[in-house]
Image (tube, helix red, strand yellow):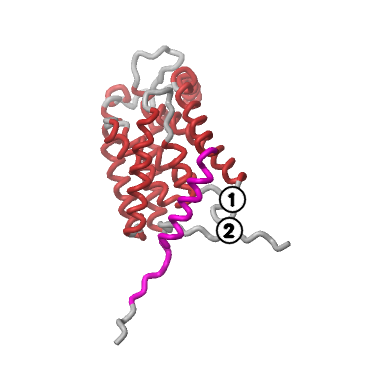
Amino acid sequence: MSAAPKAQAQARPIRLGPRSIAALALVSAVGVVAFGWPLLAGANSGFGEHAQDAPWLFAALLPLLLAVVVATIADVGLDAKAIAMLGVLAAAGAALRPLGAGTAGIEPMFFLMVLSGRVLGPGFGFVLGAVSMFASALLTGGVGPWMPFQMLSMGWVCMGAGLLPGPDSLRGRRELWMLAAYGALSSVLYGTVMNLQGWPYLGGLATGVSFVPGDPLADNLGRFLAYCLATSLGWDLPRAVVTVVLGLALGPAVLKALRRATRRAAFEAPVTFEAPKP
């Protein structure tokens, strides 16, 4: 018997170049600071005086940085075909999110974002995650200082899916289970990171779960863990379960459709111009 044919190398609509990687690294670094700076603030840092200002400051800064990343990636090679695919997938993701709104954290858009990031790569995935979350916020009316943080977090989720191993060779059940595991983990981490965005600024919490400016990092992290277990785990776990179930059930068909669309779009095909024949 002949050996099974190897999977063809998957064409990506965006190949990350040095400038794109630098832009992604910059916005990710600023995002980490935006999420976690209160944990490192000293007791005399004036955190209490600026607790209401900081979220708005980062909410104004992050969209500018996200715009720089999108522009940089687009300058590298986001052509008309890639933009069309981005629009279709972002619209689909935005339409899926409200289906579970208000129901124990069920968000069916996560499985589509993970599968799309896997097929289309980390660059396209980051842009898709940010744009999808922006569109869904406009659709659901969820616009506020938290929206840029949601855009960045979803961008990380999709980008991480594009960085998973074996993009050109791993297929079948092994790939599905890998994506299911990543989908579950990223669903929980997304909720945890978004908790970190708002937790330090919440007042009136019980002492055991409230943020205390200037306390040792380990003590505040312990309170944060208790806060997550007490408040958001009931939302994060259903999100993870729905992502796994939809990924395993619909994953083969969605992956096949995305890969077929990517091949037909021929993103990496060279464009040549020939002189008209006499």
Q: Look at the image and tell me in which quarter the C terminus lies.
A: bottom left
Image location (x, y in percent) of residue 198: 36, 26
Image location (x, y in percent) of residue 184: 52, 34
- Which residue of the protein is positioned furthest toward the right in this rendering? 1
Image location (x, y in percent) of residue 266: 42, 62
Pointer 1: residues within 10 angstroms few (<14), some, or many (20+)? few
**Secondary structure beneath label 2:** loop
> Residue placed at 31% from the left, 82% from the top?
275
Q: Is residue 163 left or right of residue 62?
A: right
Q: Is residue 28 magenta?
A: no
Residue under pointer 1:
171
Cα separation between marks 1 and 2: 8 Å
> Residue placed at 43% from the left, 23% from the top?
104
Residue type, mark 1 in image: Arg
Q: Nearer the viewer, residue 121 or 271?
A: 271
Residue type, mark 2 in image: Ala
> Residue placed at 47% from the left, 17% from the top?
230
Q: Is residue 52 left or right of residue 160?
A: left
Q: Is residue 203 left or right of residue 175?
A: left
**Secondary structure beneath label 1:** loop
Q: Is residue 41 visible?
A: no
Image location (x, y in percent) of residue 40: 41, 30
Instruction: Give the image quarter of residue 144.
Output: top left
Q: Is residue 56 visible?
A: yes
| Residues in magenta, as a range | 249-273
Mark 1 or mark 2: which comes first in sequence? 2
Q: Main secondary structure of the magenta part?
A: helix
Callout 1 touching callout 2 (CB < 8 Å) = yes
Q: Nearer the viewer, residue 210 or 180?
A: 180
Checking the image for residue 7, the label placed there is 2
Q: Look at the image and tell me in which quarter the N terminus lies.
A: bottom right
Vertical comparison of 268 with 43: above or below: below
